[in-house]
Amino acid sequence: MKVVYSLDFAREYEHRRDTELHIGIYATREEAEAVIVALRDKPGFSEHPAGFDIHEWRIGLTGWVEGFVTTYGSPPKDAASEAFDVPAWIDVKE
């Protein structure tokens, strides 16, 4: 099965939606790492260099085959609760 490498960037915030950027998909891990080197001095990325993440994906492999359920976690400062979608096979206790 063919493998590709997805490069993403994330920055977490305490009181607002996180920044989640999909940078690209590459044929090798080395190509994805080279893109990190090329981007790490750019605005935003340079202030948060740990935000890069490379994920290995197998082409043709189906994920989330069980569906998903919604669970509720600790609320943000100005809301009653916050919902999270998780794989359906996770045992959720509400």
Image: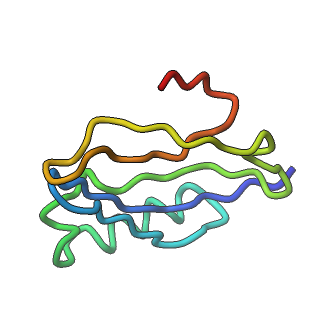
Measuring 68% from the left and 36% from the top, which residue is drawn there?
Answer: 88
> In this rendering, is residue 93 above or below 44?
above
Measuring 25% from the left and 42% from the top, which residue is drawn there?
Answer: 75
Question: Quadrant of the rendered structure where residue 26 is?
Answer: bottom right
Q: What is the total number of numbered labels drawn onto the structure image?
A: 0
Relative to 24, 10 lies left or right: left
Question: Could you say where residue 23 lies in the image, as x and y percent from the top left?
Answer: 46, 72
- Decide which of 86, 45 is in the foreground and name it: 86
> In this rendering, is residue 53 above or below 92?
below
Question: Could you say where residue 85 lies in the image, as x and y percent from the top left?
Answer: 53, 46
- The colour mode here is rainbow
- Decide which of 72, 38 is in the foreground and name it: 72
Q: Residue furthest front?
A: 80
Question: Quadrant of the rendered structure where residue 91 is?
Answer: top right
Relative to 9, 31 lies left or right: right
Question: Could you say where residue 24 lies in the image, as x and y percent from the top left?
Answer: 53, 72
Measuring 15% from the left and 56% from the top, which residue is drawn there?
Answer: 15
Measuring 62% from the left and 49% from the top, which residue is drawn there?
Answer: 56
Question: Could you say where residue 65 lies in the image, as x and y percent from the top left?
Answer: 80, 44
Relative to 54, 48 lies left or right: left
